[in-house]
Image: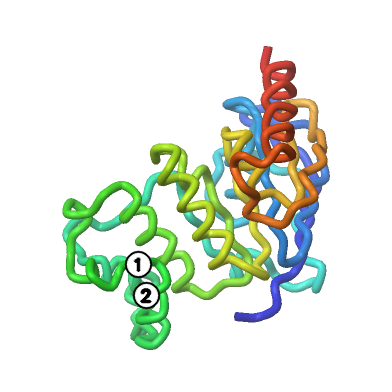
Amino acid sequence: MTLAPGITLEGQASIEGRQLFAPLSLSLDAGRWTCLLGGSGVGKTTVLRLMADLPTGADFDGEILATDKTPVAERIAYMAQDDLLLPWATVEKNIALGARLRGQKADAARMERLLDRCGLQDHRGKKPSELSGGQRQRVALARTLMEDKPIILLDEPFSALDEKTRAAMQDLAADLLTNRTVLVVTHDPGEAARLGHAIYVMTAAGLTSVAPPAAPVPRPVDATDTITCRSDLLRLLMETTT
């Protein structure tokens, strides 16, 4: 993996002439987690997809720059809310999907490390229908990491999980994504309070920065500062979405 850069997105977006989000400047610190919250329809996923150079249906007037002045999209791995596993493929083949699509051979040593670290060694030959929700998300995370990219974009990746499994997946992701530049879009203020080195609440009018707890990530779910930050974020979300 190459050194993770910082990224800045500056600009505004509209759909069929209707403003989606006002001019904003979103900076991702190199090697850190940035959490982006906001109500439905304010453009959070559009920001994510713009960074990944994926179709959005929106007209974007602005620019996306890395601190090292090199292209961003080709250094990104993207993990969607749904695991998007191929139902007919084994765990191992799903993890190696990127290499297969490029007509390349998957890095066998890297595959073994990821199967081990994600707790999937005993499930490598199983199909997605044979896995629990948490196991499927671990496969999706391993597939993302198999690409070995320095920039990781996560679009509500754990929202479909129960709270215990979600917390476990947050812990695992924080461990495996150390030193990468990560942007996670989430509706969960508790997730942002646990994971964010920087936290922003997005509205149609722009961004509001919220100070995260001082403790290192992933923060304990029951720590006073985590709970306080979660409450502050929830209060702000309620104020900005009414």
Q: How many discs mark residues in the rendered view?
A: 2
In the displayed structure, 124 sits above or below 165; it is below
Q: Looking at the image, do the residues carrying marks 1 and 2 touch, with CB atoms under 8 Å apart?
A: yes
Look at 63% across and 34% down and name the residue there. 189
Nearer to us in this view, 18 or 135: 135
Look at 49% across and 46% down and name the residue there. 167
Look at 68% across and 63% down and name the residue there. 181
- In-image side of 23 versus 129 (left or right): right
- SS at circle 1: loop
**Which amino acid, by three-letter code, is at mark 2?**
Asp
Nearer to us in this view, 23 or 214: 214
Look at 56% across and 43% down and name the residue there. 56
Q: Position of residue 23 (x, y in %)?
A: 82, 37
- The residue that label 2 is drawn on is 116
- SS at circle 2: helix
- In-image side of 157 versus 12 (left or right): left
In the displayed structure, 210 sits above or below 68; it is above
**Which amino acid, by three-letter code, is at mark 1?**
Gly
Q: Residues within 10 Å of mark 2 (few under 14, many from 20)?
A: few
Determine the image quadrant of residue 36.
top right
- In-image side of 125 versus 42 (left or right): left
- The residue that label 1 is drawn on is 119
In the displayed structure, 82 sits above or below 172; it is above
Q: Position of residue 196 (x, y in %)?
A: 69, 49
Specify the quadrant that holds the N terminus.
bottom right
